[in-house]
Image (spheres, rainbow, N blue to C red):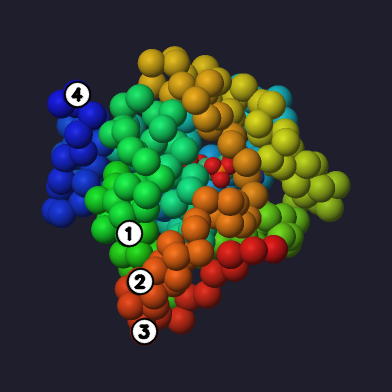
Amino acid sequence: EGQLQLREVSGIPLQASTVDNWSQIQNFEAKPDDLLICTYPKSGTTWIQEIVDMIEQNGDVEKCQRAIIQHRHPFIEWARPPQPSARNAKDCMVSYYHFQRMNQILPDPGTWEEYFETFISGKVGWGSWFDHVKEWWEIKDRYQILFLFYEDIKRDPKYEIQKVMKFMGKNLDETVLDKIVQETSFEKMKENPMTNRSTVPKSILDQSISPFMRKGTVGDWKDHFTVAQNERFDEIYRQKMKGTSIKFLTEL
Ligand code: A3P
């Protein structure tokens, strides 16, 4: 049980394995052409990782399927290596809740009502959604940062993938772009063993409880939030996000 507790580093609750590798994270030095993906959990990390790899490999599917996504894009806390990707807080909360249900090395989320409070208080792995999103949004123009929204990629994948391509200094043909759009669709990635985490042992990710590629939609929160929870959330959101110009779509 003890190992399932999150441990705080500088006030941010983290998974034990992340804390164990903390010195590696702190000593990480980016090289000029490194590309870092900085997502809040459950905001489409895997999705953007696959998009970036597909662009990098010029749409070569075989090359992208050479290894599981975790090896092609190692987590900074687990190996060595900004591109923040944000997802609206409500869908993110829902996705994180189901992820904690199936993830056997993160704390049990409890009931949905309990998790709602945990998420709002920021006492979840990697800290508060509000802080993460606000901080990246504030500094996005000061550095070479491409800020992406899950909802935008969902709405117009080709346009957003093109943005990533330009950011990476690549110029791919229309046909290659179309192929990348297809290959990085939810349906494809859900079936693809190199992206769907099916190779992770059940003792870590129990996909019989909830699949890693769960729904991949915008607006699933409507099937989880009660009317009262929604009103309360909107109020807390207004307080916590006061003064920021960021806008999220919560439905398509
Ligand atoms: P849901 O739980 O809402 O389905 P992360 O990779 O950061 O852990 O994020 C996981 C979330 O992104 C899951 O959301 C997952 O289904 C969704 N996702 C993964 N690949 C996707 C894709 N190609 N298109 C849309 N959503 C995707």
* Mark 2 or mark 4, earlier in chain: 4
- Mark 3 packing: few (<14 Cα in 10 Å), some, or many (20+)? few
Where is mark 3, residue-wise? Answer: 243
Marks 3 and 2, how far apart at CA: 14 Å
The answer to the question of whether label 3 and label 1 lie on touching residues, with beta carbons closer than 8 A, is no
Mark nearest the camera among 3 and 2 is: 2
Residue occupied by mark 1:
120
Tell me which numbered mark, 3 or 1, is placed earlier along the sequence: 1
Q: Is residue 211 left or right of residue 102?
A: right
Q: Amino acid at mark 3?
A: Gly
| Residue at 29%, 51% in the rendered image | 118
Residue 73 vertical position relative to residue 37 in the rendered view, above or below: above
Tell me how far mark 4 sits from mark 3, CA to CA.
40 Å
| Badge 4 amino acid | Glu
Q: Are marks 1 and 2 in contact (CB under 8 Å)?
A: yes
Residue 32 pos. (x, y %): 40, 54
Give the residue pinned by disc 2: 236
Amino acid at the residue labelled 1: Ile
Residue type at mark 2 is Ile
Q: What is the C-alpha distance between the residues marked 3 and 1? A: 18 Å
How many angstroms separate mark 1 from mark 2 (CA)? 8 Å
Position of 168 with respect to 6 (left or right) is right
Q: Where does label 4 land, which residue?
A: 1
The kind of secondary structure element at disc 1 is helix
Q: Residue at x 63, y 41 (%)?
A: 215
Task: Compare marks 1 and 4 and give the one earlier in the sequence.
Answer: 4
Mark nearer the N terminus (4 vs 3): 4
Count of numbered badges drawn on the protein: 4
- Residue contact between numbered discs 2 and 4, judged by CB atoms under 8 Å: no
Cα separation between marks 2 and 4: 32 Å
